[in-house]
Amino acid sequence: MALTLPHHRALPAGLTARHPWLHRPSLLAAATVLLVCVPTGEKDVTAAVHVTAADLASLALVAVTGLALLRGRLPALHRTVCVLFGAVVVAAGVATVHSIDPAASVTGFVRLVQVFVLVPAAVLCSLRDRLDQQLVLGSLVVAALVQGVVGAKQFLTGTGASYTGQPIRAIGTFGALDVMAMSTVVSFGLIAALALALGERGPGGRRGLRLSLYASAAFLLFPLAVSFSRGSWIATAAAVAVLLLRADARLALRGAVLALALGVVAIGGLGLGGAGVTDRLTSIGSVSSAPDQSVTDRYDLWGTAVRIWQDHPTTGAGPKAFQQLRDSHAPLRLSSGSDAADSQMGFTREPLLSPHNMYFLVLSEQGLIGALAYLALFLTLLANCLRNAGPGADTPSASAARPAAGAPLLRAEPAAGVPRGVRLAALGLLAWVVVDFLYADIGGTTTVLTSVILGLAIRAAFPGEAAQR
């Protein structure tokens, strides 16, 4: 059964002329991505809340969506999407009520709802046609190119963060306290560029655009390499493999051979970061047999999260509770923090305030209820994106149109098609997030990008849903 609500009159032409984001809110979604690149300066990582320019843009997007909602210009949300969002909100709310410190958990509850519900829903509502979808993906590529250029310069000129005692680690505009941010942005841009390029193959594809996107993806391999981020390397390799195998298995094989050849030329022949990259790659294979201190600390943090969950199995200890309970549940060998240094701030130690694993974080802070809610969200989106990314017309899938699949709660005009390049990008980006969450969690400047990707993934997973004009 669907609920039909009355239409309100369109926004005045003068208002949309002065404020184009009211007519095309995807501009605010793209701005959210691009504003991630704005330097935030030194941050107090122990503060309860960090508000960045990108966060403000995302909240503006939510406000514009809310304004459209009040005026009756309502989105058509698939029933499954509503259930998944509702489960996340309920899990976070129950964990907050049963928290060891409900007052402290309120900010965590708000952040979780922002990141996993409000902003993804606003992004979903903003992706009403192909231009909207490509605008947001294009902003990911532009942001990655900006960070890639800055990061490459930092490595080549020795002005980056400290790595093995040398200031060569590419960190872009983010600083050493957010050392994973640049590699995250570059990874997203690389995946988006590759997927959009694949979408331009075949009849009707634009050859010039396709070659430009391939060139962008190839360039981004270098700053990604000199970020020395093992986690981003693994997540990007997994995401690209999934993307290419879904697009064309033979293309995946040719791509692997080409990437290997480029790596040999860039690292072996030109010596661009060769020693550091080789050492870092080798260390991936030794994380179980002879882990370094950072890996040992991560294992200890995971064990700490499990012990916290065992004390609070159903509803968890509450959002933001991990950092309060860490010391009482962690082994004595856990480090007090991780080292960070760059030319601007000098040397500092960053406290370990999370388990660096999103799944363990949810388990410890929201219990089994939260773990089931988030697994349902990620696995449902991943399965649907995987199915919809296959060859076919750029139209809503037949399964989305069947009433048995779940009628929308709110009716809207028929959705525009989702181009295959967008569907492939959503699959690859979501796969990156799912893999990366095995050794990372939300936090830092790039957290809002996770929300944008979830919105894109929902649009690709349920292509029959779109916002009204």
Image (cartoon, rainbow, N blue to C red):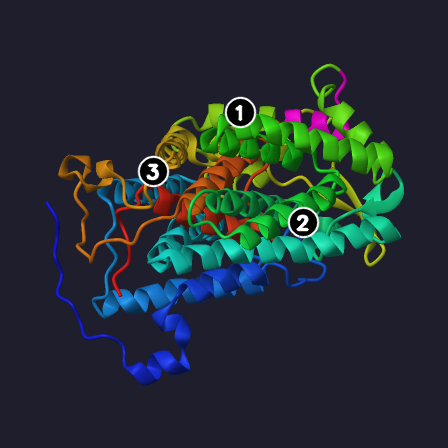
The residue type indicated by label 2 comes to: Met
- Of circles 3 and 1, which is in front? 3
Q: Residue furthest bottom?
A: 14
Residue 121 rendering spot, x and y as whole percentages:
35, 53
Identify the residue at the far top of this view: 289
Where does the image place residue 19, in percent across and percent down from the top left?
A: 40, 78
Provide residue 115's location: percent of width, then percent of height. Answer: 45, 50
Query: 71 or 247: nearer the eye?
Result: 247
Q: Can you identify the residue that label 1 sits on?
A: 306
User: Which amino acid type corresponds to the residue marked 3 in the rendered image?
Assistant: Gly
Q: Is residue 291 magenta?
A: yes
Residues in magenta, as a range: 290-300
Q: Which residue is mark 2?
A: 182
Q: Which residue is mark 3?
A: 392
Label 2 vs label 3, nearer the camera: 3
Q: What is the secondary structure assignment of the residue under circle 1?
A: helix
Instruction: Identify the residue at horizontal 59%, vertical 23% (top origin).
Output: 303
| Contact? badges 2 and 3 (CB < 8 Å) | no
User: In the image, 368: left or right of 277?
Assistant: left
Question: Which mark is in front, 2 or 1?
Answer: 2
Query: Residue 205 colored magenta?
Result: no
In the rendering, at what x and y percent does residue 304 appear?
A: 59, 27
Please indicate whether residue 314 sits to the left or right of residue 52 in the image. Answer: left
> Mark 2 to mark 3: distance in Å?
34 Å
Q: For numbered disc 3, what is the local secondary structure?
A: loop
Which of the two discs, 2 and 1, labels the residue nearer the N terminus? Answer: 2
